[in-house]
Image (tube, helix red, strand yellow):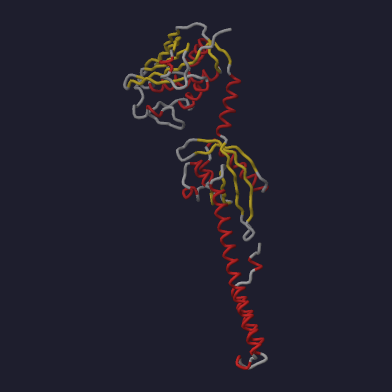
């Protein structure tokens, strides 16, 4: 293919025609003094130049169209690639991003441009982000890291970032170009695998009794802890540490709800059998024998306006007790990883109760 360098522009062709005329004029004082043969030759050459100019213009238009097509193809591949692309200034501000990266974050691309990249990084990952940023600016060698970014709703998702530094030859300024791959599903599968490796058959009664014994020294004496354990040696498949975390979180939350008035936390442990109909009332719960743990309090209950959101990730409110910092979303996640279910009964002004069900494992 011819390049722009190979194609004379209009001014070059005009200059060649003018030089040709001047060359002819050096041998005569006027066109009228030119011989018919010289005139015919000159006209022929000018016509050839005119045709050549027309052909060159057509070639330029063809090259322009090819360039536009290539640019549109590149833009489409860039914007709709299955991974996110972005460019960040040396100061850490996003200069450019493709549509995929903007979609990951739930943002319009226009709103993303000009945003400091660190604002997208979850608080717990800030140190990792700044460490890698310093390393690849200092060494200018490619860096790979895994972080949790936050979308516009505040929900976190895992990404693998592969970044490298480019230099602007004109002014020696630097930019960071990056590739972001959403690895949330991979990370969740890894976490689930790690969790499954920690699970073991446990007698739930002893785990619950140990957790309540430990909590007694933490919860104020103005709050009673009543136990109603109706089972003996039933076994579930679980990580005992995480069962303890569930009990601690829910009981501490309940105690905070009653810290000004005092009251009672009641823990009921019983065996329930779910048929297909009753199991269908719980998400992903199968029929059969289950352990039911009910933790109730005599506090003010939960504001009905927020009841439907208490298990949402990152949902926090002073109206929903103060908690141990783990959050009900994490409690919900632990229970789901144990193939269980959790529901809440709310009685504003009289208290709230959480019901947890785990499938029983039959002893060999």
91 is higher (above) or lower (below) than 20: above
Q: Between residues 355 and 214, which one lies in front from this camera angle?
A: 355
53 is higher (above) or lower (below) than 162: below
Q: From the viewer's perspective, tell me whether residue 202 is left or right of residue 169.
A: left
Quarter occupied by the N terminus = bottom right
Where does residue 89 sit, x and y in percent of width and height? 57, 51
Quarter occupied by the C terminus = top right
Q: Quadrant of residue 163?
A: top right
23 is higher (above) or lower (below) than 361: below
Q: Residue at x 50, y 25 (%)?
A: 333
Where does residue 348 sit, x and y in percent of width and height? 32, 22
Where does residue 328 sit, x and y in percent of width and height? 45, 25
Q: From the viewer's perspective, tell me whether residue 301 is left or right of residue 218.
A: left
Q: From the viewer's perspective, tell me whether residue 12 is left or right of residue 255.
A: right
Q: Between residues 45 and 107, which one lies in front from this camera angle?
A: 45
Q: Between residues 198 and 65, which one lies in front from this camera angle?
A: 65
**Residue at the outermost left position:** 349
Q: Quadrant of residue 11?
A: bottom right
Q: Residue at x 58, y 15 (%)?
A: 200
Q: Residue at x 60, y 73 (%)?
A: 53
Query: How many numbered circles are shown?
Result: 0
Q: Residue at x 61, y 72 (%)?
A: 9
Where does residue 359 sit, x and y in percent of width and height? 50, 14
């Amino acid at each position: 293919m011819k390049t722009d360098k190979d194609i004379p522009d209009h001014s070059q062709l005009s200059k060649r025609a003018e030089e040709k005329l001047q060359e002819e004029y050096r041998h005569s004082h006027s066109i009228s003094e030119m011989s018919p043969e010289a005139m015919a030759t000159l006209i022929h050459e000018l016509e050839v130049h005119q045709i050549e100019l027309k052909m060159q213009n057509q070639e330029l238009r063809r090259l322009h169209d090819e360039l536009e097509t290539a640019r549109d193809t590149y833009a489409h591949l860039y914007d709709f690639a299955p991974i996110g692309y972005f460019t960040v200034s040396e100061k850490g501000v996003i200069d450019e991003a493709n549509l995929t990266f903007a979609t990951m974050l739930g943002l319009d691309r226009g709103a993303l441009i000009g945003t400091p990249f660190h604002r997208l990084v979850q608080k717990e990952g800030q140190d990792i982000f700044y460490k890698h940023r310093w390393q690849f600016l200092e060494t200018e060698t490619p860096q790979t890291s895994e972080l949790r970014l936050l979308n516009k709703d505040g929900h976190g998702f895992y990404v693998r970032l592969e970044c490298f530094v480019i230099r602007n030859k004109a002014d020696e300024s630097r930019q960071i170009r990056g590739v972001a791959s959403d690895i949330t599903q991979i990370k969740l599968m890894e976490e689930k695998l790690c969790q499954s490796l920690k699970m073991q058959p446990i007698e739930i009664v002893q785990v619950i009794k140990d957790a309540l014994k430990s909590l007694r020294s933490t919860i104020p004496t103005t709050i009673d802890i009543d136990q109603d354990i109706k089972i003996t040696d039933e076994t579930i498949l679980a990580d005992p540490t995480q069962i303890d975390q569930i009990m601690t979180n829910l009981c501490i939350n309940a105690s905070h709800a009653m810290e000004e008035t005092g009251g009672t936390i009641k823990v009921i442990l019983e065996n329930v059998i779910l048929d297909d109909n009753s199991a269908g009332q719980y998400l992903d719960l199968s029929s059969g024998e289950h352990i039911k743990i009910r933790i109730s309090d005599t506090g003010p209950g939960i504001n009905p306006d927020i009841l439907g959101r208490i298990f949402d990730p990152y949902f926090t409110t002073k109206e929903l007790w103060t908690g141990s910092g783990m959050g009900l979303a994490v409690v919900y996640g632990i229970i789901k990883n144990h193939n269980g279910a959790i529901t809440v009964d709310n009685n504003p002004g009289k208290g709230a109760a959480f019901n947890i069900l785990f499938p029983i494992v039959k002893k060999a």
